Amino acid sequence: MVLSLANAFITVSAEVLAPPIIHNLTILPENPNDNNNLRCVWNIKEYNNEEFSVKVNWYVNGVLTNYSSDVIDASLTKQKEVWLCYIVATDSSGMSSDASAGVEITENAPVITGKIVGEVEKPKLPMFLQGLLDIFSKIFGW
């Protein structure tokens, strides 16, 4: 018996282990002021279909804090601070990946309060529109 390997195919399959991959890490809102809560959001793809965990750390002006939630209350932030959300995703095989995103806390827009003194001038309409408005006002009693 003669064995020919001319048309033989060998199939080799191997499982490639990969860490969970972090996508689209960002802090919302993108331009926060000190009245906004900060929310660290992300997407993770685990190509090996393993369970994974996510650890969150927050830094303020480069210093590690003890906050580990994905949300930071606005009362903890101050104008001009730089907040960084750093996450590590680790799968059940112990493989991990990390990513970070940061924002600077901006100044609040000024709130203008007060009251109008005197009469407010109505905007002027072109003469033909004013004429039409006068006619309709007389007809309909506006």
Image (cartoon, rainbow, N blue to C red):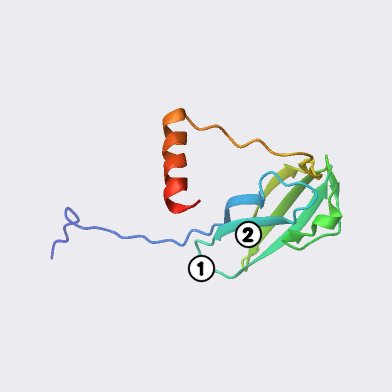
Which residue position is annotated with label 2? Answer: 95
Q: Is residue 16 visible?
A: yes
Toward the viewer: 95 or 72? 72
Residue at point 68%, 46% (across, down): 101
Q: Residue shown at 41%/38% (left/top)?
A: 132
Residue 36 located left or right of residue 141: right
Lateral position of residue 77 relative to residue 125, left or right: right
Q: How many marks?
A: 2
Q: SS for tag 2? A: loop
Residue 22: x percent and y percent?
59, 54
Q: Nearer the viewer, residue 134 or 126?
A: 134
Residue that label 1 marks: 49
- Near mark 1 (Cα within 10 A), the count class, few <14, some 14-19 or many ≥20, is few
Label 1 is placed on what type of residue? Asn
Mark 2 → mark 1, Cα distance in angstroms: 13 Å
Residue lying at the far top in this picture: please name it.
Answer: 127
Identify the amino acid type marked 2.
Answer: Met
Whether residue 19 is visible here, answered yes or no, is no
